Image (spheres, rainbow, N blue to C red):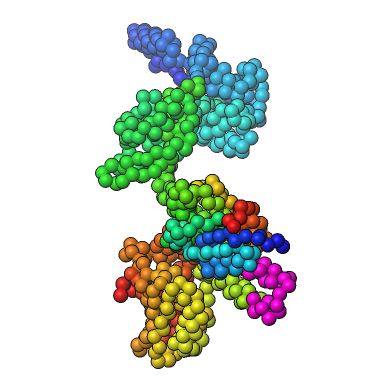
Amino acid sequence: MSTVGHRSRILIVDDDYDIRTSISAVLEEQGYSTVAVENGWEALEWMKHALPALILLDVMMPVMNGCQFRIEQMKSAAWRDIPVIVMTAKGQDELMREGMPLEGTQLVRKPFDLKTLLALVERWCLAPSG
Amino acid sequence: MRKVIRRIVARRGPRSRGTDSDKRLRAEVARLRARVIDAEETMRAIRAGEVDALVVQGQAGDQIFTLKGAERSYRLLVETMSEGAATFSEDGTILYCNGSFAKMVDRPLERTMGSSIHEFVSPQHREMFQSLVREGYTCGDTPPGARNEINFGSEPPRSVPAYVSLSPLFNDAGASVLCLVATDLSAQKRSEEMLSSEHFARSIIEQATDAMLVCDENGRIIRASRGVLGFSQQLPLFSRFCDAFPSDSLQSVLDAALHGERPLGVSASLALGSGRGVVEVLASGAPLLDLGGNAVGAIVTITDVTALKQAQKGLEVAVTIREEFLSIASHELRTPLTSLQLQLDSLCRTLKGDHDWQATIRRAESSVDSAMGQVKRLTHLVDALLDVSRLRTGRFELRPEEFDLASVTRVMVASWAEQAKRAGCALRFHESLPTVGCWDRLRIEQALTNLISNATKYGPGKPVDITIDRDADNAWITVEDRGMGIAADDQERIFRMFERAVPSQHYGGLGLGLFITLGKGSTFRICLPVAASGDRPEASVAQASLVGPS
């Protein structure tokens, strides 16, 4: 169990309270800094003020879903290169059909275990933000 | 054929007495003259062929003289006639027959004579023929004699149907010989069969319930089944196919069939005319061949598949809805599973870590609580799926019991308070007097859960009001939110299975809540009949309704 010795900021976007809080708690425990929001629109609002090192994104959410969020993200040069881990029950084909831009994303199928999530987060946050 | 014997009897003149020579002479002349006249008459009759035999009265009695010429002409007549003719003795031996008879029994003439006539009769007709023979001996020689239809030969196609008449033939020894005349009915039978098979074929076509059309090589309709009346108000006989059925697809079926092809199941839309709408059809075609295998026309069948197509469309919609449902169900089930997995993983790490025990226990308790919550959520989802299955198969049962609706609702509202708070909703329960009735407690809790869950999901950040009312007959649970509301067009639809008023990509849930329960803000009201326990069990069935914006 390695603890990453940096404070990379991770944005968690999920409408499910339990998922939001449990992921947040575990990542904080691992030394990451986290921000949790309920939908795509809230995520975009937050990103206007600060940039995360990584985004953990749910797909089915009210107000603005994961696909719509990704489309908005790709429109901005500042946001385009932020890596995204898409947490979903759907397959890649289904997401493509729904119009989600998949470049720069990593899919993780629900339900996933903590080890898998931590390994992915670690891989995508290699460059410590200081 | 009966043999006719003409009888000419030589006339005799009056006898002379010989008293007076002059008188005697005159009498002799008269007698001789009479004999001459008689002879002349006989000669004329013989020349005219009217005489078969002469019966001459002599001193030794009557003498019969037959004429050979007459027999020959009869024989010629018999031998050249098209009917079969034969004479046979009492034991059935053929004494004489003509060529037509030999041909009829399919045996050379010389071998037919001398054979038994019974062996030429088909086995199934032998008994009948024997009784005909018996009748023949007794019926006398005046027409019509004994008659019937019998078959010669054994089996078709070698058997020959014939109309047979039998009459006795007198010979020197009395009536021991029968004369048979047989008319070949094969040709007649063949035409009868052809007529009947033509009728049969026509009947098949005309009575067919599918639309069946027979067209000539110019595409003109020459036969049409009753089923065609499903597509046109009268049978389009003798009109051109393209006029009766103005559809390019149907015309292509006919054209292909006229060229010897067999197009199968070609889809087409057909306007019925006279404002009777459009039907979806499947058409097939095949060439109509003559005996030489040449296409002389075509047969086109048209089947109305409108109902089938509609059912298919309905099915496709159902499949789409089900697929969408499965996708949502998968998401809905995976979300608490994910959460559960994370909680347990986290708990594991906490327990393995080198921590202050007090803190570890507190965190473990929190993880376990959260995990229990997820299990409850999963159970609720699985129950909802099971309810759908029960409702669809008619195994949905209510278990009524007496309880106070107000207190059950109060408990439910309290248990939802924390979750509602996360959605920014204050749950406001408006207390009332105890409302006791006989209902299924579990189902009411379930309905309340569905309505409160919907109210917080679709009306986040705003208060939700829950009220209990009652009058003499009914109790009411009202759940009122201040959310997005439901468009009038969607208000009926949302009570159906898997339905929701907004796209599933945005809002979680199985879309089963209102199907199982049965909302500008939306106000949902559950009406519960107040009935004595066990009195009217069917009255315990709740009615849910959507009340207009309040």
Lateral position of residue B396 relative to residue B39, left or right: right
Q: Does the magenta run of residues contain B341?
A: yes
Query: Residue B303: x, y in percent?
Result: 42, 42
Q: Residue at x 58, y 20 (%)?
A: B103
**Camera-side residue of B141 and B412:** B412
Compared with A118, B51 (above or below) is above
**Camera-side residue of B375 and B491:** B375
Q: Residue at x 33, y 31 (%)?
A: B242
**Camera-side residue of A94 and B97:** A94
Residue furthest left in the image? B274
Q: Does the magenta run of residues contain B460?
A: no
**Camera-side residue of A70 and A93:** A70
Where, by quadrant of the figure, is residue B540 drawn? bottom left
* The magenta segment: B338-363
Compared with B471, B368 (above or below) is above
The answer to whether residue B31 of the structure is visible from this angle is no
Q: Residue at x 66, y 68 (%)?
A: B346
Is the stretch drawn in magenta largely helix, strand or loop? Answer: helix
Where, by quadrant of the figure, is residue B130 drawn? top right
The answer to whether residue A62 of the structure is visible from this angle is yes
Query: Residue B22: x, y in percent?
Result: 34, 7
Q: Residue at x 39, y 74 (%)?
A: B462
Residue furthest bottom in the image? B433
Query: Residue B339: x, y in percent?
Result: 60, 67
